[in-house]
Amino acid sequence: MSFKQPLLRFGALVSLCSSAALAVDVYSPKYFHLGPEPTIDGLQAYDGNSITLDEANSVLTLDYASEVGGWPWVEFESPSSPVQIQLKYSEPYDGLALPQGDGPWLYCNGLMNSFRTETFNITDSGKTQSFFLQGGLRWQSITLIGNTPITIRNIGLKPSVSVSNPESLPGSFSTSKEMYEQVWSLGARAVQAACVDARSQPSTWEMSDEGALIRGQYPAVSALATIFANYTLEFSTKITAGGTGWRVAGGANGGYGAYFVLTSNKEGLTSTNITSLPENSLVAGYGFTLIDQAILASAPSQTYDISTTIEEDKWYSIKTMINATGYSISVDDQEIAFVSNTNFASYVDGTWGSGSLTEGNFGFAPYLNQEAYYKDVKVTAQNGTVIYQNPLTSTDILQEYAIASNEYAVCLDGAKRDREIWIGDFAHTGRIIAASSGRYDYVKSMIEFEFDWQYPPGPAYGLVPIQAYMGAGAEYREVYYPSEFGETDYQFFFLLVLTDYFSLTGDKDLLMKNWDGVKLLVQTLVDRYYDPASGLMASADASWFTAQGSQNATAPTALFAVALNQLVEVAAALGDSGTGATWSQLSTNITTAINDSLWNEALGAYSLSLTQPDDTAILATAFTIRAGMASSDRVASSIARISDVFLSIGYKDNSVTANSATTQLSPNTQGFLFESLFLAHIKYNVSADVVVPAIQNLSEVFWPKMVTQNEYYTGASWEYLYADGSPGIGVFTSLSHPWGGAPTYIFSNYILGVRTEWNAQAKSYEWVFAPAWDIAEGLGLEWAKGKVPLSTGGYIEAEWNVFTKGAKPTMSAQVVGNSNVKINMKERS
């Protein structure tokens, strides 16, 4: 096998990936177009027939129709002479028009291709497969570089995830308005694309006795070097294609810092990347990488001509000495450049990096279309002491660099980015799974992962990570504090994940196994973040995602009460009445504090926070409703005031946010609001007339924007939207993001009407069939039917019909394939 190209011949990945059997063997394009440039118009059905690229028709546009992910491959006929082919990938169609596709994703390694373009050098016939997987995409282009024709026999992706069409899932939903079914399907596809089986995502490094073979990617950094400062990094490297790269003075959170690329004297594979990498040069950058990418800032790169000839397939010793003014780079003990840090100073960012030009970890990776071997790493402190040494020949180091194959089955925040384990996002994801794919094993595995990573005695004792890397090891969790523990209220969301899982499965064994961890986490949250003076959640070291950083705020405090209330029910089911009583009293105290100090009578809603009494937020409304802490009058009033934050198609997070073309509308936060509108009617008897307008807008205007715009459509839910309905961070937006898929479980739970409810007498949860009749009627829905998968096998199949307005509906439900589950049907009175 040759390692001189960033590819592997088909089938070479078998030894690298031990994933479970996937439902599909290949993802094939559904449509294509051959012409001089990419196009979205005039596509033809792809039938697998041969296609020839030539000088006149040099670009093949491929449409997979919806989100897929895996290892791209192309089968070629032998060209008359060597040919270079560039592949480009994107979720939105727009990305095909950009030099770098809709990437690169240079924020963290993510066990995927960091770039959205790659070039293959084709010399003979057969299948050529990328070494890297692409996390998620809908669109692909193949461009001929040069004028030598080449014929493509077949194209596809070897799956890294199992994505089925909605009609093939255990869960389903349909109703008399077809758009609702399409909106339901968004979350169902997103969780399939973002949830990965254990060991299904292989390491992006290959280890051997010769060292670590690393292809062009985002640098993976050592977890053991975060406190190193003013050090000298030495390593040996052998370039096998184009160049070699490394990072110093980086941060624990992704490695943001100084980055260097040393290129060889050979013309490499052609790249349309916007950064120039001249032959036989040193290119220096600072930040995430060598280019600016949307919200991920990087300093302009600097290029240094060098007098030393850098040959390929030859070992060199590289030395980087850090001092207060810059970085001295040597090759075989001869300085080739001194890189001043003057131009980097304004890019120092303690949020992403170490906050210092001289302090932080080191890591390795060449740039796009490059690859090199690395070995014999040594780091020496300023006093001459060797503080790190590693031959880079063993797979034992992969977790240290956060690029080991994933130990657990986990669900990521997005299919293409960030591909991190954001546990707060999972508050939606877990419930979407329960309504659609039925992969409760993912939910259980996520819970086990979090407790495996729960912080031991130390500065974060009891906390769980909120954005862990799937390739890292729990033994390094102390290194990632505080960077991986940053959004404080994501700890609260994890408690919802636990309790929602229990309500759906009744899995006492898992909860009992981790009950001490649950109690420790709750006590840690109280000790660290509960302010006895205000009775609210507030702390100088707390960062509240749900309140945009404000302390003594309604949303995070009410969210904690929601978690406590659900934990009280779990404690009762587990027979721990003492703990349940303690949590119940704390929830009561929080409820009193919020109602006494954060209800604004003049505003007619709960204030955003004590310091922003005249502002409100949709999560303040959502979580006070879900916590059961407001009177019916206050609930109705709060819902009436959400019109204050309406912008064009949906709801802003709060009234502080300005109205502009770049205002981001979050499907995540609106998902919590969405459910609270149903709860307001069901639990508080708020008239359907009050809640239906907002529900109808979210169901028929906001979420359908993800369905009706072909250039952005992926079949999955999105991360953000702008007010005009386009993706909310432009091309950078994740268009397969489970946190945006709340309608999947909300439609199943409240319109179809199949959900679990707490039975206080039995001290357990029971399945009920109880549609929100008046809301369904207000939405103009005439019927609904669907299936909800059960954790122990089988499913609940339900259906209702209303033939005339106000009439008693016909309804039926049955449990299929599981004799241990019963469903309580609640007819319309």
Image (cartoon, grey):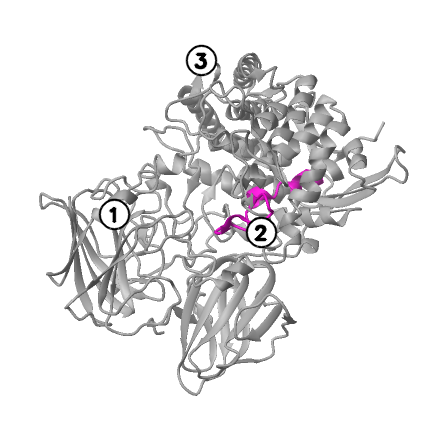
Secondary structure at badge 3 equals loop
Question: What residue type is disc 3 on?
Answer: Pro
The first of marks 2 and 1 along the sequence is 2
Mark 2: few, some, or many residues within 10 Å (few <14, many ≥20)? many
Vertical arrangement, residue 472 with respect to residue 85, above or below: above
Q: Name the residue rendered at 63%, 46% in the picture.
A: 438
Magenta extent: 722-748
Label 1, label 3: how far apart the Cα atoms are: 44 Å
**Residue 749 location (% of width, % of height):** 70, 37
Vertical arrangement, residue 81 with respect to residue 230, above or below: below
The first of marks 1 and 3 along the sequence is 1
**Residue 124 location (% of width, % of height):** 43, 82
Identify the residue position indicated by label 1 in the image: 344
Vertical arrangement, residue 230 with respect to residue 763, above or below: below
Secondary structure at badge 2 equals helix
Question: What residue type is disc 2 on?
Answer: Gln
2 or 1: mark nearer the eye: 1
Q: Nearer the viewer, residue 316 or 756?
A: 316
Any magenta on residue 738? Answer: yes
Identify the residue position indicated by label 2 in the image: 192
**Would residue 770 be seen by someone viewing this image from the given angle?**
no
Which numbered marker is on residue 723? none
**Residue 376 location (% of width, % of height):** 20, 58
Mark 3: few, some, or many residues within 10 Å (few <14, many ≥20)? some
1 or 3: mark nearer the eye: 1
Question: What residue type is disc 1 on?
Answer: Phe
Vertical arrangement, residue 352 with respect to residue 95, above or below: above
Any magenta on residue 267? Answer: no
Identify the residue position indicated by label 3 in the image: 532
**Residue 590 location (% of width, % of height):** 53, 16
